[in-house]
Amino acid sequence: MGVGSKDHVVVYDTRGIFSSCRVYWTFKVFGHEKVSILSGGLPDWLAEGYTTASGPMDPVVSGLHFFLPPVSFKKTPAFLRVVCGPLHSQV
């Protein structure tokens, strides 16, 4: 992807806000500090008249290295709601 550890990553969904929260959280857990969620996702981006690009890309070596900080997460109901969604979801 060509994302470096100093790059600001903006994640978004094609249906507003859905999976981008999980992608945001994953980047944060693995130590990437500069990450944001595009408010309204791709639908709002396009509605505002902004453009997109598509097609093949040349791979770029980025030097992005993820690490898992030495943090212990308690698997409380509140934590599981944030990570997995409603508590009736299977974990």
Image: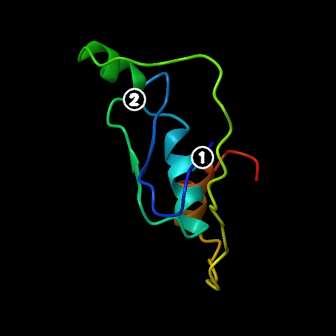
Gap in angstroms between the C-alphas marked 1 and 2: 22 Å
Q: Nearer the viewer, residue 79 or 39?
A: 39
**Label 2 CA crowd tier, 10 Å (few <14, some 14–19, many 20+):** some
- When the figure is inspected, residue 21 is found, relative to residue 57, above or below; the finding is below
Q: Nearer the viewer, mark 1 or mark 2?
A: 1
For image coordinates 47% across by 18% down, the residue present is: 53
Picture coordinates of residue 76, whole percent (x, y): 60, 71
Check disc 1 and report its element: helix, strand or loop.
loop
Query: Does residue 64 lie above or below 41 as drawn?
Result: below
- Kindly identify the amino acid type of the residue bearing the numbered disc 2: Gly
Query: Observer-nearest residue: 6 or 17?
Result: 6
Tell me the number on the disc at residue 41. 2
> Where does the image place residue 57, in percent across and percent down from the top left?
63, 27
Three-letter amino acid code at the position of disc 1: Gly
Q: In which quadrant is the N terminus drawn?
A: top right
In front here: 13 or 87?
13
- Say which residue appears at 62% left-offset and 80% top-offset: 69
Pick whichever of labels 1 and 2 is earlier in the sequence.
1
Seen in the image, is 58 located left or right of residue 5? right
Identify the secondary structure beneath mark 2.
helix
